[in-house]
Amino acid sequence: MRQQMVLGSFIFGLSRGFAYSTLQRSSDGGWANLEIVASKPQSRQNGQKLEKLTFGGGAMAAVGMQRLDELRALQDARAPLPLVDGIGRNWGLWRIVAVTESQANVIDDGTAMLIKWSLVLEEFVNA
């Protein structure tokens, strides 16, 4: 089974009907400016902030709704999760910051035929 990424026990990929189409990775160099009255600000190193990953994608019907429920169950566990990509690279531990969905074309039983979703992860470091 091919997969894009695995977060804990959750698999992202076409084979599960829940693939992401965008991935945004944000990291910070840890620099801050110290304002000086009579000259340009001085740069100071404050230490790096945690990295963030934002996944986005679309899903269809009840399968997509079920996958989002699975992600929310992982979020409710409030524990860091290992993240491993499809080529086997271990990205370390991450925590779920937010799960967002937008439902469209909802039919009479409440099932959304189209779902746009996003998942925000933040690096977990306790060293």
Image (spheres, rainbow, N blue to C red):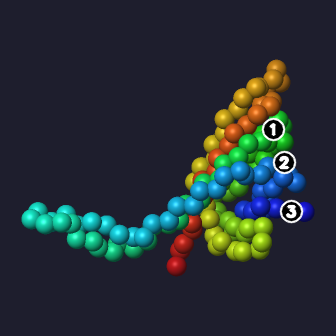
| Residue occupied by mark 1 | 60
Asked if residue 68 is positioned above or below residue 124 in the image, the reply reads above
SS at mark 2 in the image = loop
- For the question of whether residue 113 can be seen, the reply is yes
First in sequence: mark 3 vs mark 2: 3
Q: Residue type at mark 2?
A: Gly
SS at mark 1 in the image = strand
Give the side of residue 40 with respect to residue 46, left or right.
Answer: left
Relative depth, front residue between 51 and 38: 38
Question: x, y (%) of residue 34?
Answer: 23, 67
**What label sits on residue 17 in the rendered view?**
2
CB contact under 8 Å: marks 2 and 1:
yes
Asked if residue 47 is positioned above or below residue 74 in the image, the reply reads below
Q: Quadrant of the N terminus?
A: bottom right
The residue positioned 66% from the left and 48% from the top of the image is: 56
Question: x, y (%) of residue 72?
Answer: 69, 48
Question: x, y (%) of residue 98?
Answer: 59, 49
Relative depth, front residue between 17 and 97: 17
First in sequence: mark 3 vs mark 1: 3
Question: x, y (%) of residue 81?
Answer: 68, 65
| Residue occupied by mark 3 | 2
Q: Residue furthest bottom?
A: 127
